[in-house]
Amino acid sequence: MRARAAALVDRILAQPATDEEIALVERQLGRYPRGMVAVGARCVCGRPLAVVTRPLLPGGVPFPTTCYLTSPEAVKAISHVEADGTMNDYSALVADDESVRAAYEAAHRLYLAFRHELAERLGDDETHIQGISAGGMPVRVKCLHALLGQTLVMGRGVNPIGDLALDRVIAAGEFDPAVCRCTVGVD
Ligand SMILES: [Zn+2]
């Protein structure tokens, strides 16, 4: 777990956010992305889909959602899944299926290990968010944006619910990291 987290952080820190990327993410979010460390996942076109944010924002604000979804197309697509009641199915899956539950708990631990590694390297204090990951992990499904963010940044096979959510938006034809539907930064 530790080595896997370190390898992920190595990859992230190897390509720190550029001014152009920060400006593009600012347009995606409609606000300045404070504490943005790097682009964590990209559309096939190269534009950011999710960013990695430091555990402690400038000004000392703790920030638990380390893998943050920024693509407006992805945000919109996953909001539709949240609104259609699928979250209840995912919650039931985590509660009832032993292998899904175990994988979801492992995703939680990797999230924490990843952030811990990031905090150590950046010198950020994690005191206020210790043990808190994102999206409702390790036992609840509360925010699919956060879970999809983890799947996009860390890859498939890490978060089973993030993976299912990604499958669903791909099947709906609304979002796919392999199909560019970007609208921000295209002009
Ligand atoms: Zn694109």
Image (spheres, helix red, strand yellow):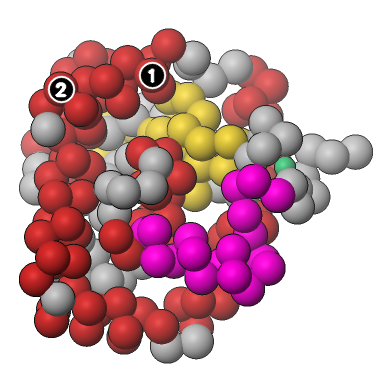
Taking the image as shown, residue 177 lies to the left or right of residue 165, namely right
The span shown in magenta is 162-179
Tell which circle, 1 or 2, labels the residue nearer the N-terminal end: 2
Q: Which residue is mark 1?
A: 11
Taking the image as shown, residue 44 lies to the left or right of residue 81, namely right
Please state the horizontal and vertical placement of residue 132, each as a whole percent of the image.
Answer: 15, 51
The answer to whether residue 166 is above or below residue 154 is: below
Per the image, label 2 sits on a secondary structure element best described as helix
Q: Which residue is mark 2?
A: 3
Q: Amino acid at mark 2?
A: Ala
Taking the image as shown, residue 100 lies to the left or right of residue 26, namely left
What residue is shown at x 40% (from left), y 66% (from top)? 164
What residue is shown at x 51% (from left), y 42% (from top)? 50
Q: Amino acid at mark 1?
A: Arg
The answer to whether residue 114 is above or below residue 137 is: above
Please state the horizontal and vertical placement of residue 186, each as a whole percent of the image.
Answer: 84, 40
Please state the horizontal and vertical placement of residue 64, each as a whole percent of the image.
Answer: 27, 45
